[in-house]
Amino acid sequence: MKFSQRLYDKVKPIWEQNHAHPFVQGMGDGTLAKEKFRFYMIQDYLYLIEYAKVFALGAVKATDVKTMARFAELLHSTLSEEMELHRQYAKKFGIATQELEEAKPSPTTLAYTHYMLHVSQNGTLAELVAALLPCMWSYWEIGKDLAKKKDACDHEFYGEWITMYASAEFGQLATWCINLMDEHAKGKPEPELRKLEEIFLNTTRFEYMFWDMAYHEEMWPNNG
Ligand SMILES: Cc1ncc(C[n+]2csc(CCO)c2C)c(N)n1
């Protein structure tokens, strides 16, 4: 069995919870309150800034030039294409880019990004890939699922988001990352595989927490 299949089996129940989450369902049927999406988008913008740094570290840790180039491309495309979608959404809400960048991370955003950066800075390339894979893979799964819903891709507000993550281009990216995981897990002893599995499980848990945080617009308990 491929290592990625083992990872998939491990987190399947959590991914089912992602799909069933009211935030995700609400994007699919268009009933999600705009205020909740606004909160998500600001936090996600902050998340992407840190996530892009994981790609930069991937380029540093890559063991061949082709992988190094791919990480460098991803660093660029995240900062330009993916974050551009957020900047466009922000415009619709009347939020300036500067305001987006000056926003403060919620506890979940902070915990998730710091965990990913901790693993990426201190671990092997395989550990870095295990940390970032749930982000790409679970978004692709969610995108494909929502795109099947009637009119979801044409929704005036959430349609662009769904179209982007359900796209073939995005699918290729997720597949590249799955293959990279398998390549770097090959031949590793069981204790190391268990460590990779735990990292993958942790960022999968953070993905679920991110949806939940956005749905409840959760910030620090004390407004200071
Ligand atoms: C919380 C959160 N998790 C995953 C993604 C999706 N995502 C972030 S970076 C990237 C790779 C391509 O740029 C992808 C797919 C997101 N936006 N927000």
Image (cartoon, rainbow, N blue to C red):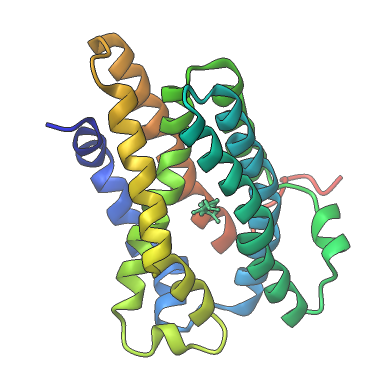
| Residue lying farthest to the front in this orientation | 65
Name the residue at 50% across, 56% down: 211
- Looking at the image, is 158 positioned above or below residue 84? below
Image coordinates for residue 206, horizontal then vertical, percent: 49, 42
Task: Residue 178: give x, y in percent of width and height.
Answer: 32, 41
Q: Is residue 28 above or below residue 131?
A: below
The N terminus: image quadrant: top left
Name the residue at 24% across, 36% down. 10
Residue 43, given in percent of the width and then of the height, sits at 67, 55
Q: Quadrant of residue 7 in the image?
A: top left
At horizontal 36% and vertical 35% (from top left) the residue drawn is 180
Left or right of residue 213: residue 144:
left
Q: Is residue 153 left or right of residue 82?
A: left
Q: Foreground residue, 139 or 167?
A: 167
Rendered residue at 54%/33% (across/down): 68
Is any part of residue 84 visible from this angle? yes
Q: How many marks?
A: 0
Examine the image and state in which quarter residue 81 appears.
bottom right
The foreground one among 93 and 61 is: 61
For the C terminus, the image quarter is: top right
Q: Position of residue 44 (x, y in %)?
A: 63, 56
Work out which residue is located at the far left of the displayed protein and give it.
1
> Which residue is nearer to you in this view: 19 or 185?
185
In the foreground, 15 or 140: 140
Q: Is residue 39 visible?
A: no
Q: Is residue 214 above or below residue 187?
A: below
